[in-house]
Image: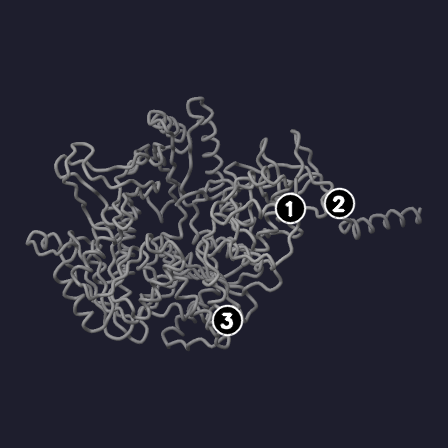
Amino acid sequence: MHILTFFVHLRSFMCNEFCTFVPTMSQYADVILPLPLQGVFTYAMPRESEIQPQVGSRVIVPFGSRKFHTAIVMRLHDETPSYPTKPISEVLDAKPLVLPEQMRLWEWIADYYLCSLGEVFKAALPSGLKLESESSVLLNEDWEAAEAPLTPSEKKVLEALSSKKGKTLASLQKETGVKGILPTVKSLLDKGAVLMKEEIRRTRKRKTKKAEADISPLPEGDASPLTPAQSICMQNILEQWKTKDVCLLHGVTSSGKTEIYIHLMQKAIEEGKQVLFMLPEIVLTTQLTERLRRVFGERLGVYHSRYPDRERVALYQKMLSDSPYDIVVGVRSSLFLPFQRLGLLIIDEEHETSFKQQDPAPRYHARNAALVLARQAGAKALLGSATPSLESYHNALIGKYGLVTLKTRYAGMQLPNIEVIDTKEMHRKKMMTGAFSPQLLSRIRQALEEHKQVILFQNRRGYAPVMECKECGWTPRCEKCDVSLTLHRGFRQMVCHYCGKTYDIPSVCPSCEGKNLSSRGYGTERIEEQLQAILPEARIARMDLDTTRSRQNYEQILHDFEEGRTDILIGTQMVTKGLDFDRVSLVGILSADQMLSQPDFRSYERAFQLMEQVAGRAGRKGSTGHVVLQTRDKENAIVHQVTRHDYEGMYAEQAEERQLFNYPPFCRVVFIYLKHRDESVVESLSADFASLLRRVFGERVLGPDTPPVSRVQMMHIRKLILKVELSASTTAVRQRLIALQKQVLLMPQYRSAQVYYDVD
């Protein structure tokens, strides 16, 4: 009996100690496909592959009759599905490309923002890591064949490619006869022989890494010492982090927030932690990167969409290596990188709308998703802004976040003086010169005489937002969208800013054949033209989407302005976002009314933020700056609050109104958009869906209504609003919405309709 008991215990011990180390072959893999489809898809494991897939690794799988995609393995198991499975075609990674922490963030984003895991996957990885049958490939004309030996399959693919026109992987496979085209193209991508069509190409002379290597880094930790006010501020942040994981730093413009960030980053690195420093706009990384690299040297990586895909892939892979970057500076997509020891997350200009992804899905807010990332990683988070979002400031006031304020500008500089000009009165007296009041022109001339610089803010690109026939009132509109066309004189075209379609400028009115066509309103292009005519001696540059389409362009514009080779910089929102120039003494806000008249419950908040931020570009060094604010509504409360730099007054007024009408930050808002090519169908669908929603959510549902732009790319649009209590379960809301969506789209008349959600 004792011997039998001994063997039973021995067998149990051996199973417990050794069974976990014996590799077992799972039969199936659940994978995420980069498609807007709910759920995961099950495939049989490859039996003859040299490497077996792991959770988080990439595999190539067939989908449908002819398509193939790069998928991410989410789960390995032996549960036989109820349907026949196809086998995995290829395994691309010996080690996971997506870490468990990343997968948890993907799942949260899909759940909270009401989208599929596949849509998150598509947004999270650089194009070079998610090849699919419809991906287009180009020959890299800068690549030299001697750089790496090629296999016969790779040679065939290169012979079929050109540097001018891309070819899809499906067509390449058909043309070359190479089986398993994806691994071949992946190998060519790794060697630099080919490029993905999505990447922005640059010549070899302009490679970023070479340019950055020329900057001699100072010894690590050699940051400028903090002022007494900054030191107190930093200590207060550290004190807040003892009890709260998130702290809001409310510091006025030019108060030296960046220097505090640098010292906090240095402290995190000394503790062996990684740092993610998020910025809202690519344009901000140019100034900041050089400043940070002088302090942190090669421990700093930069990640944003204007870098070529090959460089983004290289940075992603370095973050998975044994020697990842300690600090990453990036825009919203940087939160998807594989951090292994994230300890600090800084979100500068946290109020910026650029952190919110609009189209396509996932329509996530990078600030909120980043805070979830920090919580999951056990990291501390710092939100910084001179004009915090109402949501963040509310969370700080109720104690959810810590709150630290910095009310003084660096070196004792005063906030700029703001002069309000009533353009309605100026127009009545016929004193306006185009878009310029006499006061603004006088201030510009004075700044130029003193060898100072000027920033002019006009939040509308193009030459003019509207063309019009003076005889019959005809206005050109987009054929695909319910919007008027914007005149771009530099391109000699009219452009739809929604679908991008371009049209020739008509010489006669197509309605009455009259020749009296004129433009109405002012875009940045027209402002530049008028000002150059008024001040021919001034060196003027324009900074908007049209002039900054490539990375070199916006870097050159900023560099020229910083070096004093430009006197006046005219721009859209880009010029409001935290740029730091020593010589700017004057800022002109050409039309505050455009911002104040937007049909959005956040319009006043955003108008205050934009005007206060652009005003903060003036007088950062030397004498006190001056701001000329032109408006037709001089008595508007927001105008008075900007004049007094009164953020707290703006918050109090807007928060009271939001609470009265139950809008964020006192609830969550989900916009539900419905689209169909037939207007009568979408009208009926919106009514039926609203009826179903009200059965579940009651009076929380508003609409349907017709949005200001009710047709985009031939699709008619209707909108519903769902207001949800902050205490409500996001998962439960999602489950009910998706169930109701499936129910309504099963109706035959609605099967070709589209429904999507925009949360917060």
Residue 260's tag is none
Q: Residue 706's image quarter? A: top left
Which color scheme did the rendering employ for the protein? one colour
- Judge whether 377 appears above or below 410 on screen: above
**Gap between marks 3 and 2 measured at Cα:** 45 Å
- Amino acid type at image mark 2: Thr
Residue 297's tag is 3
- Judge whether 681 appears above or below 467 on screen: above
**Gap between marks 1 and 2 measured at Cα:** 34 Å
Q: Earlier in the sequence, mark 1 or mark 2?
A: 2
Is there a contact, CB below 8 Å, between mark 1 and mark 3? no
Q: Of helix, strand and loop, which one carries label 1?
A: helix
Residue found at the very far top of the displayed protein: 748
Nearer to us of marks 1 and 2 is 1
**Gap between marks 1 and 3 measured at Cα:** 40 Å
Residue found at the very far left of the displayed protein: 429
Nearer to us of marks 3 and 2 is 3
Does the image show residue 717?
A: yes
Residue situated in front as seen by the camera: 359 or 375:
359
Q: Tag 3: Cα neighbours inside 10 Å, few (<14), some, or many (≥20)?
A: some
Residue situated in front as seen by the camera: 739 or 443:
443
Nearer to us of marks 1 and 3 is 1
Is there a contact, CB below 8 Å, between mark 3 and mark 2? no
Q: Of helix, strand and loop, which one carries label 3?
A: helix
Does the image show residue 244?
A: no
Q: Of helix, strand and loop, which one carries label 2?
A: loop
Q: Which residue is mark 1?
A: 153
Left/right placement of residue 437 relative to residue 128 reads: left
Q: Which residue is mark 2?
A: 24
Question: The C terminus is located in which quarter?
Answer: top left
Please tell me which residue is depicted at 81% across the width and 48% down the height of the picture.
15
- Amino acid type at image mark 3: Gly
